[in-house]
Image (spheres, rainbow, N blue to C red):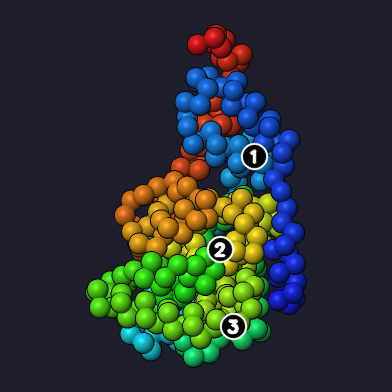
C-alpha cells in the first residue's frame, strides 16, 4: 500500500496530524493516582504510561507487539571523505544484521522487539548533495513509502534506527537547513573521524546548504535535497505511525534528524515520539533541545542502528507493567492517606 502518493499528499498528511485520545489519557492519570504509591513517586514512568494510554486509546495500554525497524542507505556525499569507513561497510553491516551478529540483534531480542531491516538500493548511492539534490522526487517518495510500509497497524510501539556510511553528514545538513545554525554546530565525529575530518564535514555541509539555498523549504524538499534514503524512510515511518496512533521511539542523532524537517513544517509531529537516549554525537543534544524531546537515557552511546532506542524500550515496558499490574489502594486494602 502506498501511504504517500505524491509530495503534496505527504505534505497534506503532515499538516493534518491526529491527536491522542484525551479520555484514555485522563483515565490513565486517574489510575496512577489510585495505585499503591505516593503520587508522582514513579516519576517519568508515570508520564510514559499516560502518554501510551493517549496514543493507544486504552487506559491500561500494553505492548503486545513491538518492532525495531532499521533502514540502510548509501550516500554520494562520501566522495568528500566525510567518513572513517568506505560505503561498502553499509552492505557488510546489513549482512551482519541478517546473520544476527550486530548489537541491534542482541538488544532488540533483549527488549522483546521483532527486528526488520530494510536496505534501500545500496547499489545506488544518493547523489552528492553539494552539487545536486540527493534524490529525485520519485526516489524520495519511494523511500518515504518504504518507511511507512514498515509500520504495521497492529504494532503498539515502533523503534527506529539506521545504518549508512556518510549519514551523519546528511543528518547535520538536514538539521542546519531545517532548524538553522552553522554547520560546525551540527557536525561531529560520526564513525570516528578526527578533528580535520570534522572540519571537512562542516565545509561539505556549508557547501550543501549554499547550493540549495534557493530551493523550497518544505519538509519533502529538504529531505530529498540533503537527506538520504534511509533517513527519508525514517521520516515516512514516523508520519505513518502518527496516522495509526503508534508511539515512536527514536534512536540517536541521525535517526532524530529525520524529524527535523517535519518539525520545521509542523512542530506537533514530535507529540507521539519519545527520544530513547541522548547520544555522544555533539549535535544530538542540541537537536533534542530544539525539538523539545527529553531523552530517557544518556549512556554515551553513538553506534546508531537503533541500539540506544532498543535499550530504552525496556524502560517503557517497565512503565507499562507498573501501570497495569500494580494494585490500587482499594484492591490492596491500603490506606490512601499516606
Residue 215, by quadrant, is bottom right
Question: Vertical placement of 282 versus 203: above or below?
Answer: above
Q: CA distance from mark 1 to mark 3?
A: 43 Å
Residue 259: mark in rendering: 2
The image quadrant where one finds the N terminus is: bottom right
Whether residue 96 is visible to the viewer of this picture, yes or no, is no
Residue 16's spot in the image, x, y percent?
75, 59
Question: Vertical placement of 18 versus 118: above or below?
Answer: above
Whether the residues at callouts 3 and 2 have beta carbons within 8 Å, the answer is: no
How many callouts does the rendering have? Answer: 3
Q: Nearer the viewer, mark 1 or mark 2?
A: 2
Q: Secondary structure at mark 3?
A: loop
- Identify the residue position indicated by label 3 in the image: 214
Q: Secondary structure at mark 2?
A: loop
Whether residue 17 is visible to the viewer of this picture, yes or no, is yes
Q: Which residue: 62% across, 71% down?
A: 219
Q: Nearer the viewer, residue 115 or 304?
A: 304
Q: Secondary structure at mark 1?
A: helix
- Identify the residue position indicated by label 1 in the image: 53
Q: Nearer the viewer, residue 132 or 102?
A: 132
Q: CA distance from mark 3 to mark 2?
A: 22 Å
Q: Which residue: 36% across, 71% down?
A: 184
Pick whichever of labels 3 and 2 is earlier in the sequence.
Answer: 3
Residue 20's spot in the image, x, y percent?
69, 45
Q: Which residue: 60% across, 46% down?
A: 64
Q: Nearer the viewer, mark 3 or mark 2?
A: 3
> Neighbour class for label 2 at 10 Å: few (<14), some, many (≥20)?
many
Residue 2's spot in the image, x, y percent?
73, 73
> Neighbour class for label 1 at 10 Å: few (<14), some, many (≥20)?
many
Q: Which residue: 61% across, 50% down?
A: 271
Amino acid at each position: 500500500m502506498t501511504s504517500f502518493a505524491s509530495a503534496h499528499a505527504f505534505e497534506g498528511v503532515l499538516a493534518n496530524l491526529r491527536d491522542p485520545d484525551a479520555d484514555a489519557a485522563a483515565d490513565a492519570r486517574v489510575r496512577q493516582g489510585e495505585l499503591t504509591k505516593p503520587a508522582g513517586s514513579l516519576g517519568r514512568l508515570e508520564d510514559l504510561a499516560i502518554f501510551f494510554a493517549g496514543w493507544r486509546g486504552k487506559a491500561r495500554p500494553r505492548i503486545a507487539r513491538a518492532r525495531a525497524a532499521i533502514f540502510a542507505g548509501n550516500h554520494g556525499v562520501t566522495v568528500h571523505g566525510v567518513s572513517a569507513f568506505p560505503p561498502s561497510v553499509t552492505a557488510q553491516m546489513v549482512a551482519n544484521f541478517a546473520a544476527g551478529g550486530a548489537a541491534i540483534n542482541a538488544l532488540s531480542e533483549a527488549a522483546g522487539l521483532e527486528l526488520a531491516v530494510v536496505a534501500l538500493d545500496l547499489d545506488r548511492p544518493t547523489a552528492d548533495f553539494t552539487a545536486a539534490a540527493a534524490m529525485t522526487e520519485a526516489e524520495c517518495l519511494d523511500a518515504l513509502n518504504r518507511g511507512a510500509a514498515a509500520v504495521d497497524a497492529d504494532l503498539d510501539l515502533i523503534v527506529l534506527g539506521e545504518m549508512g556510511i556518510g549519514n551523519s553528514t546528511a543528518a547535520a545538513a538536514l538539521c542546519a537547513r531545517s532548524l538553522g545554525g552553522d554547520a560546525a554546530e551540527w557536525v561531529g565525529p560520526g564513525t570516528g573521524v578526527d578533528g580535520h575530518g570534522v572540519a571537512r564535514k562542516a565545509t561539505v555541509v556549508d557547501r550543501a546548504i549554499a547550493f540549495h539555498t534557493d530551493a523550497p523549504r518544505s519538509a519533502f524538499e529538504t529531505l530529498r535535497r540533503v537527506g538520504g534514503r534511509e533517513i527519508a524512510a525514517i521520516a515516512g515511518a514516523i508520519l505513518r505511525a502518527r496516522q495509526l496512533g503508534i508511539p515512536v521511539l527514536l534512536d540517536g542523532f541521525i535517526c532524530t534528524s529525520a524529524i527535523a524537517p517535519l518539525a520545521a513544517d509542523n512542530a506537533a509531529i514530535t507529540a507521539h515520539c519519545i527520544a530513547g537516549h541522548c547520544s555522544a554525537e555533539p549535535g544530538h543534544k542540541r537537536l533534542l533541545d530544539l525539538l523539545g524531546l527529553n531523552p530517557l537515557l544518556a549512556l554515551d552511546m553513538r553506534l546508531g542502528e537503533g541500539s540506544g532506542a532498543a535499550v530504552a524500550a525496556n524502560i517503557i515496558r517497565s512503565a507499562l507493567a507498573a501501570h497495569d499490574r500494580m494494585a490500587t489502594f482499594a484492591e490492596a486494602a491500603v490506606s490512601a492517606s499516606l
